[in-house]
Amino acid sequence: MAERILVLGSNSFSGASFVRRLLGLGAEVVGISRSPEPIPPMLPYKWDEHSGFTFHQLDLNHDLDEIMNVVQDFQPRFVVNFAAQGMVAESWQSPEDWFQTNAVANVKLHDRLRHCRFLEKYVHISTPEVYGSCEGSVIEDAQFNPSTPYAVSRAACDMSLKSFFRAYGFPVVFTRAANVYGPGQQLYRIIPRTILFIRLGLKLPLQGGGSSRRSFVHIRDVADGTLRVARNGVPGEVYHLSTTRLISIRELVELICARLKVAFADCVEIVGERLGKDAAYILDSTKARETLGWKDTIDLNAGIDETISWVDGNLGELKEQPFGYIHKK
């Protein structure tokens, strides 16, 4: 019998890539997102011929009853939740929207899901932003120190889920991944944005000169880790998915420029830093590696080359899409 998995936020880059992974393994998948499905180049699960997927356009803020009807009808083994109001800098402009989606709506969902006795595991896709700016390697029980409305709203949800685990035995497991990237990613993210701007002859605004340092992990490696957490993660536990390579945003853009054989100075404009941006963090992923057998397999250079090929192969359609983030309430 096919494995039944329900994916919230199935139109997000991470969600759609995870759905693609599941369908490739023959799972039966239901996807739920508040937005209609985007164009195929932005939806990785559309790139292969697979059956077993059903999509529902439903909003966690407004359609909880309908979402729970889908859950009850489908009775999945796992619910994996990628649905969140993203974007750090923009969360300062209307923080209440971030708290509504990332905290209030999610808590309402969890309070309904805890009554679903068929649910074996609830996988909550969290974020390393909850730790704030850190020095050294960050382990899973590091203290929360969120520095933006986005990060505070995500930390509040994580803390609520921990209380549900302790009070009700709610079978939640958490993942926190490094900066994900790969083909199909939203065009406002740094890697596809840099490639697209260079191909179109546009200047890339580089916030703060690109001094912040990050680890970048390919989305296929993250999809593999997420499934391992769903199947074998211990309820109540957090699992980090990250590479050990730390690179500044400037160095990343320089690397992309080198792959595309263009001069960094010709392609970049230095602009001011965004409010509350964390300087650096690198996640310690030892637990996922040692207890789940997970590892990152795709080198950053190879992953960037793959993303360049995706941009070049779909340039006609991608250049007609919005380049910036569009806020949805």
Image (cartoon, rainbow, N blue to C red):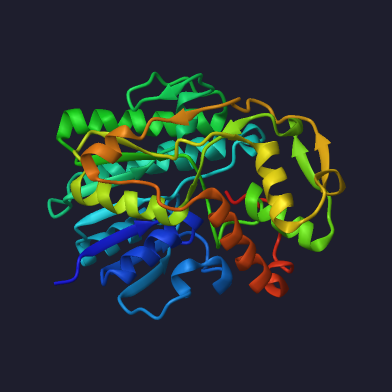
Q: Is residue 116 above or below residue 167?
A: below
Residue at horizontal 72%, vertical 51%? 258
Residue at horizontal 19%, vertical 39%? 234
* Towards the viewer: 134 or 146: 134
Residue at horizontal 54%, vertical 49%? 300
The spot of residue 203 in percent (x, y) is 83, 50
* Towards the viewer: 114 or 10: 10
Quarter of the figure with residue 174 = top left
> Is 121 on the left-hand or right-hand side of 238?
left
* Towards the viewer: 309 or 233: 309
Residue at horizontal 60%, vertical 31%? 213
Q: Is residue 26 above or below residue 93?
A: below
> Is 91 on the left-hand or right-hand side of 292?
right
> Is 99 on the left-hand or right-hand side of 194?
left
Q: Quadrant of the N terminus?
A: bottom left
Q: Is residue 10 visible?
A: no
Q: Which residue in the rendered view is the most extreme toward the right?
A: 266
The spot of residue 93 in percent (x, y) is 67, 35
The spot of residue 307 in percent (x, y) is 59, 60
* Towards the viewer: 214 or 55: 214
Quarter of the figure with residue 276 = top right
The spot of residue 8 in percent (x, y) is 38, 56
Q: Is residue 76 visible?
A: yes
How many marks the image carries: the answer is 0
Q: Is residue 232 above or below residue 74?
A: above
